[in-house]
Image: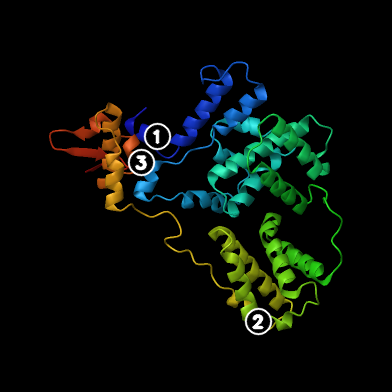
Amino acid sequence: MSFSARCKRRGRGLNKIAAEKRLHKILDKPQRAGIDKHVAPHVLRHYAASRTMPRGRTSDAIHGHSNAATRHSLARRVWHSERVINQLFTFSSTIERLRQGPLSEHLDAYAVAVAEQGYTHHSIRQQVVVIADLSRWLNHKPIALQDLDSKAVDRFLRLRRRQQRLRRGDLKALERLLAMLRQIGVVKPDQPPVADTAQSRIVAEFRRYLLQERGLSPLTLLNYVPVIEQFLSERFHNKALNFAMLRAPHVTGFVMLHAHQLSPVRAGLMVTALRSFFRYLRHRGAITTDLAGCVPAVPNRSLSTLPRFLPTDDVERILECCDRTTSVGRRNHAILLLLARLGVRAGEVVGLSLDDIDWSTGQITIRERAGSRPSCR
């Protein structure tokens, strides 16, 4: 393999490839991974699946690299893709194990839905694993997919708890899955029909408007409808819906009350849902004022996320943590110097070899990506 090819491989996909290689090692030879040979198979599978989750890099904090772009690019680029799981996992054998059971055909749609809600790449992988476990469990139970309900999910979670496989977030993930399946009509409603009220009728009409006239995906309604139901409940308190009395302060007050309780992504979904609803009301003649223009934007403050770079004093303190009396400490110190002083990216450091260092001139050749021209620093 050429050096440029090695750099490309070691760069962007290093964490995921290494994690899934470890998964295969655990499944094939558990003793080599330091696991007792008497561990039950289901515990071994759960441990192996959990090892496919990539870990963050400390060098990202030094450079200020943010995972936000990677995290949300999934939702942006795969809306028209039917193989989202192939982008979350690398090896075909892993994907084949995930795509078993009656829920396998809905994994991609679920991954897109939660990515739009702002869940991280790591969290989406965890949720996909527990849904795949439920799908394989359903294969051995006399439960048709359309009959899947909260009671069946509770039975599955009790089994995981007895096997000590229950993870925090499993329940919420399966609740979101059930809500999605009910929304698209795959699973029967788990509760009696909603009472025929003015609020339920306007919400049902808004849902039909989004699906039929706007052509939105049923999954988008999972983000829009709860916001509108909450706004109507708080504004009218189950009274008659008098939309003509709505004013801009009612809209801005609702956003200001709830936006700080949500992540920036979820807050953005909330204001998008409100704007869509007020455009619908104006379209049907229920209001004459353009309330959609009154919905405030959610600020994304520069200091609300990780800092883009570390101050000099903090970098010096990190460098002092390296024990330079050992070979590992000297190696770490050299890597941190490359990151902090030369601005070398983590993937570029991984791709360096001794041949790239010209000791006589004090130059280092950096190959930023395969096929690009090398630069000297």
Q: Quadrant of the N terminus?
A: top left
Judge whether 305 appears above or below 364 on screen: below
Quick check: 17 left or right of 85?
A: left
Residue 238 spot, x, y in % from top left: 80, 72
Question: In which image quadrant can residue 38 be found?
Answer: top right
Judging depth in this view, the residue of 39 and 71 nearest the camera is 39
Quick check: 343 left or right of 23?
A: left
Residue appearing at x 68%, y 47% in the figure: 172
Earlier-in-chain disc, 2 versus 3? 2
Tag 1's secondary structure? Answer: helix
**Residue 170: which numbered mark, if any?**
none
**Residue 10: which numbered mark, if any?**
1
Judge whether 23 appears above or below 67 on screen: above
Residue 208 spot, x, y in % from top left: 76, 64
For badge 1, the amino acid type reads Arg
Question: In which image quadrant can residue 235 be found?
Answer: bottom right
**Residue 247: which numbered mark, if any?**
2
Single out the mark in the foreground, 1 or 3.
Answer: 3
Residue 49 spot, x, y in % from top left: 59, 31
Residue appearing at x 74%, y 64% in the figure: 207
Q: How many marks?
A: 3
Residue located beneath label 3 in the image:
346
Q: Is residue 196 visible in the rendered structure shown here? A: yes
Residue appearing at x 26%, y 41% in the figure: 337
For badge 3, the amino acid type reads Ala
